[in-house]
Image: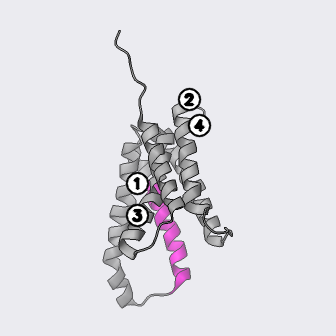
């Protein structure tokens, strides 16, 4: 995406809609005060953006090597952070192993493999817009599973993000000649 081609007016409009929607879902309502978690999420978003760009540049090459590197560094990071949280007994390790294997294979390796495959066919800017659906689904699932309420401004923000997906997927009409 960076340096490859000039984005169309349609795509710029979709990005503007998505950012407005994300703002409405995140920062509207009461007074906002930045917290450590917000800074961590901001840093994570920055690194996701870098990852999307890297995948876009490497999508035509060897995806298995990229998948291995992504998985290796994810495991390395988790291995470095996990001991700092608390020590587990052998019984607790055995109990947590099946869900951990599931999370590692399906949610990390599987999701990354699907992204690598899919991003061969989708521009990185569109892939980034697709990732913006995460807060929309998080809000929907928190309503369904936890009974949390969504304010009207948050619902409007979710609608703007969905509209951005629609705008980004529209194709110019062709006339018959």
Residue sitting farthest toward the front: 152
Residue 64 belongs to magenta span: no
User: In x, y percent, where is residue 82?
Assistant: 51, 77
- Rounded to the nearest angstrom, the CA distance separating label 1 from label 3 is 23 Å
Per the image, the residue denoted by label 1 is: 112
Residue for point 46% across, 66% down: 75
Element assignment for label 4: loop
Q: Which residue is mark 2?
A: 5
Q: Residues within 10 Å of mark 2 (few under 14, many from 20)?
A: few
Q: Residue at x 51, y 33 (%)?
A: 10
Which numbered disc flags the more N-terminal residue, 3 or 4? 4
**Residues under numbered marks 1 and 3 in contact, where contact means CB atoms less than 8 Å apart:** no
Specify start and end residues of the magenta stretch as a single range.
Answer: 68-86
Depth check: 28 or 115 in front?
A: 28
Q: Is residue 71 magenta?
A: yes
Crowding around mark 3 (Cα neighbors within 10 Å: few <14, some 14 to 19, many 20+) is some
**If you read the primary sequence from the N terminus, does the residue marked by circle 1 or circle 3 appear first?**
1
Element marked by disc 2: loop
Q: Quick one: label 2 or label 1, which is nearer the N terminus?
A: 2
Q: Is residue 61 visible?
A: no
In this figure, which residue is indicated by the disc labeled 3? 140
Mark 2 or mark 3: whose residue is earlier in sequence: 2
Q: Mark 2 or mark 3: which is in front?
A: 3
Q: Is residue 2 above or below residue 172?
A: below
Secondary structure, mark 3, is helix
Residue tagged 4: 2
- Residue in the image at 56% along x and 29% along y: 5
Q: CA distance from mark 1 to mark 4?
A: 21 Å
- Residue at 46 percent across and 56 percent down: it is 70
CA distance separating discs 2 and 3 = 35 Å
Q: Is residue 45 left or right of residue 130?
A: right
């Amino acid at each position: 995406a960076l340096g490859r081609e000039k984005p169309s007016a349609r795509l710029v409009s979709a990005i503007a809609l998505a950012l407005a929607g994300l703002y409405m879902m995140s920062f509207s309502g009461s007074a906002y005060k930045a917290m450590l978690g917000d800074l961590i999420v901001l840093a994570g978003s920055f690194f996701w953006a870098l990852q999307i760009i890297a995948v876009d540049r490497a999508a035509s090459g060897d995806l298995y090597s990229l998948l291995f590197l992504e998985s290796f560094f994810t495991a390395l990071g988790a291995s470095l952070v996990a001991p700092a949280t608390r020590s587990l007994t052998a019984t607790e390790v055995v109990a947590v192993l099946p869900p951990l294997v599931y999370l590692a294979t399906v949610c990390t390796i599987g999701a990354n493999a699907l992204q690598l495959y899919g991003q061969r066919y989708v521009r990185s800017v569109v892939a980034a817009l697709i990732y913006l659906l995460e807060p929309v689904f998080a809000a929907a699932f928190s309503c369904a599973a936890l009974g949390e309420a969504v304010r009207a401004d948050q619902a409007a923000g979710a609608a703007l993000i969905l509209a951005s997906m629609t705008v980004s997927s529209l194709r110019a009409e062709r006339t018959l000649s």
